[in-house]
């Protein structure tokens, strides 16, 4: 009886683990490949230069904008996947992760807000402003 329970628990746990792994891989692998592609083709440098002035306020390199855009338009995991291939210090990773935690998956979550009867633009603006304020504060504090 104990062996059957253990076997069932292990099987269920492994199924759940692989389900989550697959879910994350479907988002993180394409995001990582996209950033790598942008880097190899020179577009990451161009985009980084365009975003560098705004990102400097947050203590982040221009390339970090790619992770923020990916996270905000797709999912937090896409942002983390993009962040993984960037050369960032521990402080920069903290700032970027905190910002992604506060502002991510905006189209999906905007649809949920709309369905609940909320004001989508207000909620999205609040999340973006809060993420920016936290990023700025972390940069100034550390």
Image: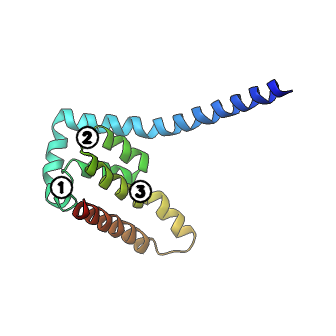
- The CA distance from mark 1 to mark 2 is 15 Å
- Give x and y (percent) for residue 74: 41, 50
Q: Is residue 126 above or below residue 45?
A: below
Instruction: Report the mark closest to the observer, 1 or 2.
Output: 2
Say if mark 3 contacts mark 2, CB within 8 Å: no
Q: Residue 88 in the image: state x and y as whole percent.
A: 24, 44
Residue 34, position as x, y percentages in the image: 31, 38
Disc 2 designates what residue? 86
User: Is the residue 141 above or below the residue 90 in the image?
Assistant: below
Image coordinates of residue 52 in percent, x first then y, are: 15, 54
**Mark 2: which secondary structure?**
loop
Residue under circle 1?
A: 51
Q: Residue at x 52, y 68 (%)?
A: 113
Going 49% across and 61% down the picture, which residue do you hit? 109
Residue 2: assigned label? none
Cα separation, mark 3 vs mark 1, equals 20 Å
Question: Counting other residues with Cα less than 10 Å from the Cα at mark 2, is it few (<14), some (14-19), or many (20 or more)?
Answer: some
């Amino acid at each position: 009886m104990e062996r059957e329970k253990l076997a069932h628990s292990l099987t269920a746990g492994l199924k759940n683990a692989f389900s989550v792994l697959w879910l994350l891989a479907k988002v993180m692998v394409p995001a990582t490949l996209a950033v790598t592609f942008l880097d190899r083709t020179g577009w990451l440098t161009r985009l980084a230069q365009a975003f560098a002035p705004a990102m400097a306020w947050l203590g982040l390199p221009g390339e970090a904008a790619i992770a923020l855009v990916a996270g905000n338009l797709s999912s937090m995991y896409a942002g983390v996947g993009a962040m993984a291939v960037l050369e960032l210090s521990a402080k920069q990773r903290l700032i970027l992760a905190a910002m992604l935690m506060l502002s991510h998956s905006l189209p999906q979550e905007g649809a949920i807000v709309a369905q609940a009867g909320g004001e989508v633009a207000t909620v999205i603006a609040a999340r973006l402003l809060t993420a920016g304020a936290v990023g700025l504060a972390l940069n100034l504090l550390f």
